[in-house]
Amino acid sequence: MGKKRKHSETAAVTEVNKEDSAAERPKRTLLGWKDKIEEKKESDSVVGFRNKEKVLVTCSRRISFRYRHLMLNVVSLLPHCKKDNKVESKDSKGATLNELVELKGCSSCLFFECRKGRDLYLWMAKCPNGPSVKFLVNAVHTMEELKLTGNHLKGSRPILTFSTNFDKDPHWKLLKEMIMQIFGSPKDHRKSKPYHDHVFVFSILDDHVWFRNYQISCPHTGTQKIDRADLEKMTLVEVGPRFCLNPIKIFGGSFGGPTLYENPFYVSPNQIRALEKKQKAGKYAKKIKAKTRRKMHELENPLQVDELAHMWNE
């Protein structure tokens, strides 16, 4: 029976065999052949910040079909959102929504609240500590109504653009930061595409925030391609939806808390409808007053009796 070799002898034999053997073939990758073995950098081992923003989108009960279609359009534009069942619009909706956000693993919430079947309010909140903003939604036009020619891939990341008015006042700066966090798709999200092909435009006009969605169109035919950063040949085609946000209040907490800002120019839809009713009632009152004046005038100035009026009756 032969003797076993010592471990040191086997290691020496393997080293000699490695030196005598041929060099290793370079590895083939998608970008070509790898000639050198890349060493891992220390910076790769350090884990950086990863945006894990998720948005819960829900609505109240008894919402109209147009507003429900608007909510579905917003859901289709945000690949990092989660849709939930309808929530009862009560005073305790804040606690219910905060609990739902925690159960769904989200960090923000968009709540579409419909009042009286005609007024739509949008709550934009960071949960569970706030802040939160309450908007009145006006000038609603869904994708199904507009039927525009623009089209972009579902799940692609948008480019957010803001007008210069957002940098003037502190409450507009806060709104800008909240919109960036909620409407901006996180990088490397599992449901999002890794490129940009549409633009979200937020502009301030008459103390209202106007929203537009445009597709970035690059006209190219055959082998003709557009150079990078050649913006003159790119065009914007509107996709939809359209809506206008009128800020009412900004709260320090989630769906409540101390009031940080209140819009002094806000007029509720109930007051507008009450003024319209008063104007209509004023028209009716004017007609009644005109009739009474006519009767008083006839009593004060009676017609004289005509002596020849009954001459041909005999």
Image: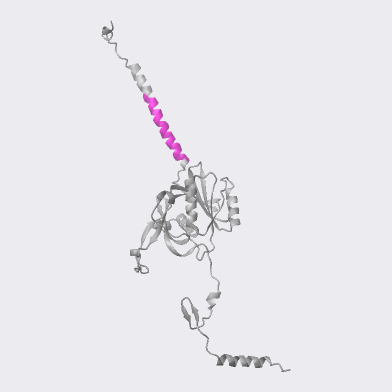
The x and y percentages for residue 96 are 60, 50
Q: Residue at x 54, y 77 (%)?
A: 42
Query: For the point 41% across and 33% down, which residue is it?
Result: 280
Residue 242 seen in the figure: no
Spot the residue most to the top: 314
Magenta stretch: give its range: 270-290
Return the x and y of residue 149 as percentages of the image width and height: 38, 55
Q: Nearer the viewer, residue 65 or 128?
A: 65
Count of picture labels: 0
User: In the drawing, does residue 217 fall left or right of residue 23?
Assistant: left
Relative vertical location of residue 46 with respect to residue 56 in this rendering, above or below = below
237 vs 88: above or below:
below
214, 248: nearer the viewer: 214
Q: Quadrant of residue 274?
A: top left
The quarter of the image holding the C terminus is top left
Image quadrant in which the N terminus is located: bottom right
Is the image coloured rainbow, by chain, by secondary structure, or in one colour? one colour
- Could you say which is closer to the camera, residue 308 or residue 282? 308
Task: List the single residue furthest toward the bottom.
Answer: 2
Q: Is residue 151 left or right of residue 39?
A: left
Of residues 46 and 289, the one drawn nearer to the viewer in this rendering = 46
Residue 309: give x, y in percent of width and height.
27, 10
* Prevailing secondary structure of the magenta residues: helix
